[in-house]
Image: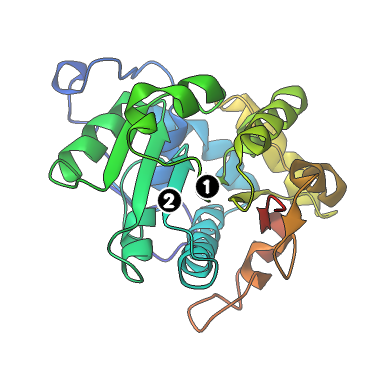
Amino acid sequence: MTGDGPAEGAGRDDRRAADLPPGVDLGRPSIARVYDYFLGGKEHFEIDRMAVAAAYEVIPELSRLAHDNRNHLRRAIRFLVADAGVRQFLDLGSGLPTVGNVHDIARNVDPAVRVVYVDNDPLVLAHGRALLSDDTTTLVLLADVRDTEAIFDGPEIRGFVDFDKPFAVIATSILHQFDDHEAYAVADRIKARLTLGSYVVISNFLDDDEPRANAADRAFLAGGLGTGRFRRWSEQREFFEGLEMVEPGFVYANDWRPDEYTPTDSPVHTLYAAGVARKPV
């Protein structure tokens, strides 16, 4: 897969609904499966590919947004573990398991890091639990990221994460899935749950005065995925209100602490932004 056009993953259209985990709905597209499609995976179906077909017409390199996001996530996790000393992570809207998951990156620095994956797609739950069935420092939960009470107060997570110690919440490629009211409400609820010294990682589609942003925004909506909002800089900086930004702040995703593996020629460089912030002690 080159990342310069529609993803090349073959998909799973030969599988019947009866062969899938309970709750998987093949009558509507899934954000987790679409993201898997962007990354060249196989856990997606025709309905998922159709949902983003119009967006691909607007931005032929659309899948590069997912790759730029994964690259930023890798750098952010390494910073949080190696430099900030974080040893607990909650990955909200984690999506289907793929190369470079949070626990893989973090444990290259410290094998004892604990990670909680949260998603509302039953396929994510099934794959995650099968993959991590023997892993005692990783937890996979089926929950909606908008229900912070169920996530943070559930008995499973309370016995797994010590909220009296700093932790990091990963909220990448999530807030652009919600309308304005819901996006800011989710961000506020996440921030309210951060203990002093804890971090949040946020990345989203960006409208930086590029015409393709508005057109892709409309295409995502027409595809039945709800929203795929390309918000402006000022709109997204509100997500971090009350927090201390980690340098270099909220920037183009590929400009956040780039390393030798960070793309320098991404055709969607100005369509994706990311940042890391800390709740002040």
Q: Which residue is mark 2?
A: 88
Q: Which residue lies at the image location 47% right of the left edge and 68% below the top edge? A: 78
* Residue displayed at 80% across by 54% down: 210
Please say if the residues under marks 2 and 1 sit with CB atoms less than 8 Å apart.
no
Circle 2 packing at 10 Å, graded few (<14), some (14-19), many (20+), is many
Can residue 45 be seen by looking at this rendering?
A: no
**Three-letter amino acid code of the residue under disc 2:** Gln
Mark 1: which amino acid? Answer: Ile
Task: Please report the residue visible at 48 percent of the width from the left and 59 percent of the height from the top.
Answer: 86
**Residue at the spot x=18%, y=44% of the render?**
131
Vertical arrangement, residue 51 with respect to residue 257, above or below: above
Give percent across and percent down for residue 161. 39, 40
* For residue 127, side relative to residue 110 (left or right): left
Q: Is residue 40 above or below residue 161?
A: below
Q: How far across and how far down the image is residue 59, in percent?
A: 62, 51
User: Which one is closest to the eye, mark 2 or mark 1?
Assistant: 2
Residue at label 1?
170
Q: Is residue 280 above or below residue 11?
A: below
Q: How many marks?
A: 2
The one nearer the camera, 255 or 209, is: 255
Residue 160 pos. (x, y %): 33, 38
Quadrant of the rendered image containing residue 174: top right
Q: CA distance from mark 2 to mark 1?
A: 11 Å
Q: Residues within 10 Å of mark 1 (few under 14, many from 20)?
A: many
Does residue 122 appear left or right of residue 249 in this picture?
left
Q: Give residue 226's position: percent from left, percent from top.
A: 60, 24
SS at mark 1? strand
Per the rendering, the mark at residue 189 is none
Q: Toward which corner of the image does residue 259 lie, by quadrant?
A: bottom right
Q: Which element type, helix, strand or loop, lies under badge 2?
A: strand
Earlier residue among tags 2 and 1? 2
